[in-house]
Image (cartoon, rainbow, N blue to C red):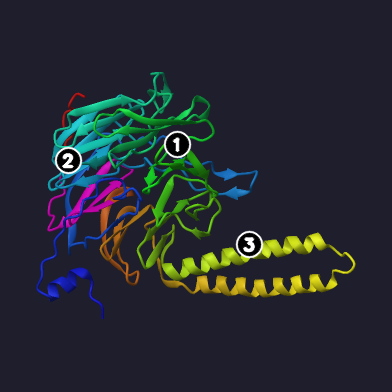
């Protein structure tokens, strides 16, 4: 029997240490949602923090139905700011607020407020903590860098040359709000500003140390909303209800727009982009260098490890043999491409005299391709390792060997080995955000509450809001 990491350590007489930060949304710029740290036993609430006002999402939800395409009960595709998503560095927790236009820093051990920083518009996305600094953007159209220890401003850059305001979500916001996260990588800060293509959507790179502009590209066909993703050479830009754009990190020039059903959820793994949830709760997977999808999955979110993929939907969590599934998906795509070419050739022949032998050969080839396609599809179905019912549909992350899923008024720990529920804890509201760092779990809900769960937590105190520090 294989012991979980925590039990194995105890059996060997060793001490499990927790030392992994969660310094950006879903821990890294692939938005993996995976921490290598195992969770301690007996998680209980250590503290909670509650905002005076709940989050104020930019978009309230999807239309109920798409009459033209006959799609009903559609999924909301712009869900990036339904909670105050927490990031953690060392013993400090940070988050932005769409309710009072501030970024906050709390003591991650006690929940005590340490500092706040005010902007002139909602801060809809979590900051990134890099080298002792916090980087974030605001609906006021500015990009900010502040000292992560004190909250003192280091630099502030208006994302566009013009400061023009319009009414938006009950406030005056910039015509070019910063509605994507910031990626800080190799000394540069990547972000965008603007949600109205007719006004221009600015994609830019700034010097992380000073805020000086490195490059700028303006797109006039797609908005930019959601959490940016980055590899070593590519920047992936979610576009709200539209499909993400892939851009060159060196200059911001667009490489392609991938095919799919849209949405602001995205995950990057081995240069494969997984995104959705589309109109019906479907994730599409697109490989680097391609625009069309390799595979689609019915679900809202995905967790990927070197050997397994975990698919998270409204009603269940499933585990797949990742390597075998991708191998078969690539084979199926290759066969389907060949099938299309053979069909095209057969159609071109029509019923011309003298082509009977060639037509017969093509028909036989199609029959063989059909059988191989069926075999590949069956093989993909057999990659299922386990399936477990789940009522925790809003969010999922992986810490060590435990999946942590967020539902309504509850979060649950689920064994990644077999899908069995190992614990449940109450929270206030829909748990749209989860971070796992340094032996603790931070849960953010649509009620503006942040819960900290850790081993030995005994108090459930709600800490007051600290006074703001002027920019």
Q: Which residue is mark 3?
A: 337
Q: Which residues are magenta?
A: 435-463
- Image spot of residue 432 (x, y percent): 34, 48
Q: Name the residue at 27% across, 26% down.
A: 156
Which badge, 3 or 1, is on the more N-terminal residue?
1
Q: CA distance from mark 3 to mark 2?
A: 54 Å
Q: Which residue is mark 1?
A: 224
* Labelled pair 3, 1 in contact (Cβ < 8 Å): no
Q: Where does the N terminus fall, quadrant-wise?
A: bottom left
Q: Where does the C terminus fall, quadrant-wise?
A: top left
Q: Nearer the viewer, mark 3 or mark 1?
A: 3
Q: Which residue is mark 2?
A: 106
Secondary structure that dominates the magenta span: strand
Residue 166 visible:
yes
- Image spot of residue 356 (x, y percent): 85, 72
Query: Circle 2: is it few (<14), some (14-19), or many (20+) Cα within 10 Å?
Result: many
Which badge, 3 or 2, is on the more N-terminal residue?
2
Element under disc 3: helix
């Amino acid at each position: 029997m294989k012991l979980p990491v925590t039990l194995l350590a105890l059996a060997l007489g060793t001490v499990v240490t927790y030392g992994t930060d969660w310094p950006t949304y879903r821990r890294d710029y692939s938005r993996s949602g995976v921490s290598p740290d195992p969770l301690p036993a007996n998680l209980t609430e250590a503290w909670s923090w509650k905002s005076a006002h709940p989050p104020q999402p930019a978009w309230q939800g999807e239309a109920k139905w798409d009459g033209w395409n006959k799609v009903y009960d559609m999924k909301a595709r712009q869900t990036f700011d339904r909670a105050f998503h927490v990031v953690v560095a060392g013993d400090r927790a940070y988050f932005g607020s769409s309710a009072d236009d501030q970024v906050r820093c709390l003591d991650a051990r006690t929940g005590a407020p340490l500092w706040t920083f005010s902007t002139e518009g909602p801060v809809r996305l979590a900051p990134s903590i890099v080298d002792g600094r916090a980087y974030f953007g605001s609906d006021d159209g500015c990009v900010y860098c502040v000292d992560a220890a004190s909250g003192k401003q280091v630099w502030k850059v208006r994302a566009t040359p013009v400061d023009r305001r319009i009414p938006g979500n009950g406030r005056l916001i910039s015509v070019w709000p910063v509605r994507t996260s910031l990626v800080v990588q190799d000394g540069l800060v990547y972000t965008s500003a603007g949600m109205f293509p007719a006004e221009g959507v600015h994609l830019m790179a700034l010097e992380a140390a000073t805020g000086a502009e490195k490059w700028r590209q303006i797109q006039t066909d797609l908005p930019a909303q959601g959490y940016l993703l980055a590899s070593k050479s590519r920047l992936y830009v979610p576009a709200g209800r539209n499909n993400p754009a892939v851009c060159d990190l060196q200059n911001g020039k667009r490489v392609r727009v991938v095919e799919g059903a849209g949405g602001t959820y995205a995950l990057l793994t081995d240069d494969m982009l997984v995104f959705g949830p589309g109109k019906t709760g479907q994730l599409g997977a697109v490989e680097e260098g391609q625009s069309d999808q390799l595979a689609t999955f019915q679900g809202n979110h995905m967790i990927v490890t070197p050997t397994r993929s975990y698919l998270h939907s409204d009603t269940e969590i499933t585990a797949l043999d990742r390597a075998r599934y991708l191998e078969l998906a690539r084979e199926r795509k290759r066969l389907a491409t060949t099938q299309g070419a053979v069909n095209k050739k057969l159609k071109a022949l029509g019923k011309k005299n003298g082509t009977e032998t060639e037509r017969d050969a093509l028909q036989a080839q199609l029959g063989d391709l059909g059988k191989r396609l069926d075999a590949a599809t069956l093989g993909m179905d057999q990659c299922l390792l386990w399936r477990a019912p789940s009522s925790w549909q809003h969010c999922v992350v992986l810490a060590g060997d435990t999946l942590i899923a967020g539902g309504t008024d509850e979060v649950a720990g689920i064994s990644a080995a077999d899908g069995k529920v190992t614990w449940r804890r109450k929270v206030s509201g829909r748990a749209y955000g989860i971070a796992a760092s340094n032996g603790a779990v931070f849960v953010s809900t649509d009620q503006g509450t942040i819960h900290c769960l850790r081993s030995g937590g005994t108090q459930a105190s709600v800490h007051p809001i600290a006074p703001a520090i002027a920019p």
